[in-house]
């Protein structure tokens, strides 16, 4: 059984453990199946790549993708980051609350420190 992640793409998070502890960044990608997130500017790794030709023989048939050392962000386990509340601007845990909106029950994320809704702009 997998537990739903309470962090989504576009959220601002703070790293709470590891070499980048204390850094904040925006979530570029969330991977719920792996229980990981990719945060902008955090956990940068170096990838050594070879030069290789372009795949299709289109108008740029003779060109190659350059090789070298490429820096890119790596995935971080979701347990190593905390959501930064947009209201109180502090890293916080998140609770889920059911609200009735337009006759429909919707789950909304709520900050545990200030009890304010995090998903205010996501209402239908």
Image (cartoon, rainbow, N blue to C red):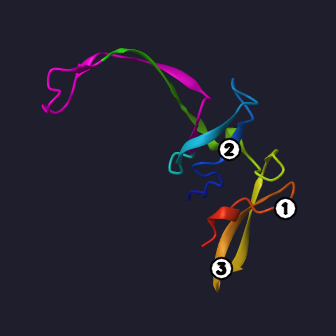
Q: Earlier in the sequence, mark 3 or mark 2?
A: 2
The mark total stands at 3
Spot occupied by residue 29 in the image (x, y as percentages of width and height): 52, 44
Q: Earlier in the sequence, mark 1 or mark 3?
A: 3
Left of 92 or right of it: where is 65? Answer: left
Element marked by disc 1? loop
Q: Is residue 119 magenta?
A: no
Label 3 near label 1: C-beta < 8 Å?
no
Q: Is residue 41 magenta?
A: yes
Q: Residues within 10 Å of mark 1 (few under 14, many from 20)?
A: some
The residue at which mark 1 appears reads as 115
- Image quarter in which the C terminus is found: bottom right
The residue at which mark 3 appears reads as 105
Q: Distance from label 2 to label 1 (Cα)? A: 18 Å
Element marked by disc 2? strand
On screen, residue 12 above or below 108: above
Residue pushed farthest top? 68
Q: Distance from label 3 to label 2 (Cα)? A: 26 Å
Q: Which residues are magenta?
A: 36-65
Q: Which mark is residue 12?
A: 2
Spot occupied by residue 98 in the image (x, y as percentages of width and height): 71, 74
Image quarter of residue 28? top right
Element marked by disc 3? strand
């Amino acid at each position: 059984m997998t537990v739903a992640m309470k962090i989504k793409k576009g959220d601002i998070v703070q790293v709470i453990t590891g070499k980048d502890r204390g850094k904040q960044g925006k979530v570029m990608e969330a991977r719920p199946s792996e229980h990981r997130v990719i945060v902008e500017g955090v956990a940068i790794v170096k990838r050594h790549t070879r030069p290789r030709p372009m795949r299709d023989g289109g108008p740029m048939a003779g060109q190659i993708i350059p090789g070298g050392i490429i820096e890119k962000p790596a995935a971080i386990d979701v347990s190593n980051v905390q959501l930064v509340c947009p209201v109180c601007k502090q890293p916080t845990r998140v609770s889920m609350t059911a609200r009735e909106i337009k006759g429909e029950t919707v789950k909304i994320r709520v900050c545990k420190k200030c009890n304010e809704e995090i998903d205010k702009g996501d209402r239908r």
